[in-house]
Amino acid sequence: MEVIITAKVHPYLIDSFTAKGFTVTYLPSITYAELLPIIGRATGLIVSTSIRVDVPLLDNAVQLQWIGRLGSGMDLIDVAYATTKGITCVSSPEGNCTSVGEHTLGLLLNLKNKITSSYLEIQQGQWIREPNRSFELGSKTVGIIGLGHTGSAFAKLLPAFGCKILAHDTGKSGFGTEHIQEASLEQIFNEAHIVSLHIPMDKANYHYANDAFFNAFQQQPLFLNACRGKVTDTAALIRALEKQQISGAGLDVLENEQLATYTELERAQLNTLLHMSNVIITPHLGGYSHEAFFKVSKILIDKLDGFLS
């Protein structure tokens, strides 16, 4: 039995597979083209965000029994087709949700307190206070769209600040608590001073944050996205910033995170965002803490235990 690992993983994962009698082929830098001719010998496949598991790959995977996705998001895996071939697909979103929640809070605190922008001003010899005056979260309303693992982890951190928390999730209801108020999108559009996206990337959510989305805001909120880049229409985001429909943006994800492959348009869009003082971009670090690096592997092994035995 062989498992092919296509991403950088904690040693715990490799050791666990080895202890269960698997031959481990650890290829964290493998490309799709390199994986295609060897996938046929694998019983199991471990992926993260670099390999698309599509129909041609699955058709070549003649011995594959299961696919393990490190962390959250199954958008790169054709789960429906894999299921028709008897291949089980599992993920471990519980392992990095705390890390994503904390990173989202970090983006929010940085933006509202103008930490990065004022630091860059000081680098230029400017000591500017009045325009950098902040606000306290206790006076604001936070709207969370998507209350799954990461949205819930972000929400868990907010009550200490005393802010009002509105949450909307199309996949569930009746989740209101002492601190979280179940809300419609319209209520979030009307009331929220901060809006954070925590939704999966699928066909329905492609460019979820589009012109109509940004046009609906009534409070010029700070906009946060630490889920998937393609849920936000970059061009619409830039228009919303330029028209001051939102007061700033904190992004841990981009539509295309392979900067070396950028088209002229993509380079121009990124350059525009990078030169806006009310925008922060980080390189998809949300779920990448040291603790999450271990936990996504541990949880994945636990979920796959029945197959591995």
Image (spheres, rainbow, N blue to C red):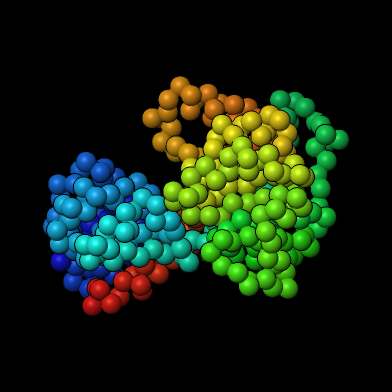
Q: Is residue 74 left or right of residue 193?
A: left
User: Residue 128: x and y, percent?
Assistant: 81, 32
47 vs 219, nearest the viewer: 219
Residue farthest top in this picture: 264
| Figure check: 42 above or below 116 | below
The residue depicted at 43 percent of the width and 59 percent of the height is: 71
Q: Quadrant of the C terminus?
A: bottom left
Which residue of the protein is positioned furthest toward the right in this rendering? 130
Q: In the rendered view, would you say 36 is above or below 294?
A: above
Determine the residue positioned at 55% across, 46% down: 208
Q: Give the quadrant of the N terminus.
A: bottom left
Q: In the image shown, does 46 or 174 lie closer to the viewer?
A: 174
**Viewed as shown, does residue 248 lie left or right of 283?**
right
Question: Does the rendering let one see residue 232?
Answer: yes
Instruction: Tell me the quarter of the picture where residue 269 sits.
Output: top right
Residue 82, horizontal then vertical, whole percent: 26, 59
User: Picture quarter containing residue 242?
Assistant: top right
Q: Residue at x 76, y 61 (%)?
A: 164
Measuring 73% from the left and 73% from the top, which residue is drawn there?
178
Whether residue 49 is situated above or below residue 89 in the rendered picture: above
Residue 93, position in %: x, y? Answer: 46, 63
